[in-house]
Image (spheres, grey):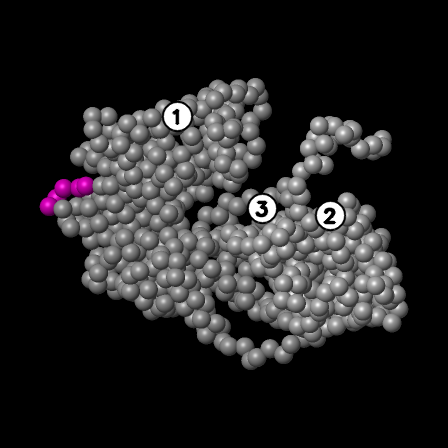
Amino acid sequence: MTAPPTDDSSPAVDPELAHYLAQHAAPAACADALIRDGQGRILLVDPTYKQGWDLPGGMLEDEEPVRALAREVDEELGLAIEVGRLLAVDTLPAAVYGRTVLAFLYAGHAHGEPAASALTLQDSEIRAAGFFPEEEALALLPEPVSRRLSAALAAERGSHTAVLRDGHRLPVRRRDHYALLPAPMVAATVLLTDTAGRVLVLDPRDKRHLELPGGMVEAQESPGQAAARELAEELGLTVPVGRLLAVDTSPASATRHGRAQLCLVFAAPPLTAAQAEGLVFVDGEVRAAYWMDRKEAAVRLPARLAARVAAGLAALASGGIVHLEQGVPVAAPVAPSLRARAAEARAAMVERLEDEGVLTDPAVRRALLAVPREVLLPRCYVRRPTAPGRPKAWQLLDGADPRDQAEWLVRIHDGGAVPVRQGGEPLDAAERGQVVTGGGFTVRSAAVAATVEVLQALSPAAGDRVLELGTGPGVVTAALCELVGGGAVTTVEADPQVAEAARARLAALGYRPRIVHGDGAGGCPGARFDRIVLSFAVRCLPPALLEQLADGGLLLAPLTTGAPGRPARATVVRSRGELSAVLRPVGSGHRPLRGPDRATAPPQLPTGPVAVRRSTVSPPARTEGGFWLAAEHLVPGLVLADGAVGGEVAVHAPGERSSAVVRPDGGCWTVEYTGPRDLWAEVEDVHGRWVRAGRPDHYRIDLSDPAAQRVTGGSGRRPLEWHLPSAPTASAAAEPHEESRR
């Protein structure tokens, strides 16, 4: 047999392969169409050669399914259709008809609005045809075809193809299950205003009406990220996207797309005159842009969009979020008081921690519920989406401003670390709404899970004398006051402005701990404490604090190498005058003591020659906390990069412009490194030592000489060992601030 003829556009076919395929057994196949009329009803046919109704279509000859479907519909009904996307493919096993059958179900699009009376039925094959509502069509069809149509309807409203076996869905993994769920379309728009309060309106090339900046949300991004991307693509703007102002929802029956739709309207900082004059239509989708006042926008925009603008402007003024249904605002219930809303958010936060298994101590639970975070965190910064490649941006929210309250309450109770001051700016004096870039936050409240872990590990009892190092906003201080009583808590804060703000807010809540201005590493000389806890990370255990630990007491201190990596915590116990300490990796950590600066992974590999070799070690998982803890101490300057994909690992020594990337390569690992150090070789060496030491997951700290702290771990004759850096010279002894003596 010779190969089939080819034309210039087709690649040559191997004659042997063509012969094999021609002789190869193949399943039978059919292709049907889901065709709707102008009212959304589904076309069914009544074939002469079988009982009951069916979908239009038929068996494939030696042809493509799409061509076969168009041919069958034209022959049987005299209807020309455009075959759309594949909605479902159903495999019928040989046990059903004696031969495996593949049944394809496509979307079929007729030109104009088809009617049953205009169809030309092929008398020999079709008795009748008609359009039926979805539920009626499903009831009329035989069960196997009804199941297939039902799956196709779900796929039609989603973005997938239903894969069936004899009309039944195949089992899928959880990730696939969520990907296959039908979902509403989501659009993200931005209410851009200028300093005069006017609104930016666009004239798009692909629509007959004016529009707001924004577009559809893609699968891999959040609505805020989509809005930021659209601003960059449409207008060349890289402003951060602000809080949610309005949500406009529509059911599938009210849209022309056949799917429910959500439109989210976001705020953005008012554009400066330079930004407003510098708009460029990057992707060519916009013809022109206009600045309109509220009245002009209401007249020139379609009613639905004008309603979104009005709702967004109202939400900007009130600080709330407006819900619209098909462009009509939904009446909101009477808003509860701020205190009630905060208590509800606090209770939800505690419930989440319990559900996640983080919070298990009833006493700590009671303390978290009792501490009003909204009083201690009256302002905070919140991350804003920015266009790809732009610096990270944060915007300042003020809980006293109604426009910010909804988002502020969510942010201070969502469980993450809450930044409240950047650099050395005066506390609470920064302008509400200001946008800062680059991070550099010097005051923040720790992530709630980290606070819970510390409080539960500290396990203070009523009457215990507690020393906290690093007061910050006072959230942990207040919880300690709830656990042991305010008179038993001493807290040390190096920044007098931060200490004074915490003192005032704690006093307003009825908490009166002793607040001390001074060096946290120096503690409170002359006193002994049953519990000592550091809210900042140190390179070694401060000797002054070890001296202040009472017999039977417990000290908790986060330890760091100064680089982001696996957080670790030292637990120190004094028993009968002797100190013992254990260092373990933990789930979350704290910033170093000396300011916000720390080593970070560079955004890209250093320039220079790149060497390539094979690795003798598969990159240890991040869950191997005991290994990475040792590696960070034994490989000087090591920084483990975040966000690695595809199984690769990147390590850096930024101070020496050295980096290494380890990638999977067919069951092996390839190392690409640059700079004066082969970092991965150093990691491999530590890994070998760690394995020979018995893979320790924790380490002992020898404090027999607090000035020379030695860490050891593992069993046998070859334990891992290193020394912690010497403690820096402590600043002058801390003295109580006179306000704290009241």
Q: Position of residue 619 (x, y in %)?
A: 43, 32
Q: Position of residue 510 (x, y in %)?
A: 33, 69
Q: CA distance from mark 3 to mark 1?
A: 34 Å
Q: Secondary structure at mark 2?
A: helix
Q: Earlier in the sequence, mark 3 or mark 2?
A: 2
Going by the numbered disc 1, the residue's amino acid type is Glu
Q: Nearer the viewer, mark 1 or mark 2?
A: 1
Provide the residue designation for mark 3. 392
- Local packing at callout 1 (Cα closer than 10 Å; few below 14, some 14-19, many 20+) is some
Q: Position of residue 348 (x, y in %)?
A: 43, 66
Q: Earlier in the sequence, mark 3 or mark 1?
A: 3
Going by the numbered disc 3, the residue's amino acid type is Lys
Going by the numbered disc 2, the residue's amino acid type is Glu
Provide the residue designation for mark 2. 233
Name the residue nearer the viewer: 282 or 434: 282
Q: CA distance from mark 1 to mark 2?
A: 45 Å
Q: Earlier in the sequence, mark 1 or mark 2?
A: 2
Name the residue nearer the viewer: 312 or 593: 312
Q: Is residue 663 visible?
A: yes
Magenta segment, prevailing SS (helix, strand or loop): strand
Say the numbered circle drawn on residue 719.
Answer: none
Provide the residue designation for mark 1. 684
Q: Secondary structure at mark 3?
A: loop
Q: Residue at x 19, y 46 (%)?
A: 573
* Direction from residue 681 to residue 316 in the image, left or right: right
Residue 170 part of the magenta-drawn span: no
Q: Secondary structure at mark 1?
A: helix
* Direction from residue 169 to residue 127 in the image, left or right: right
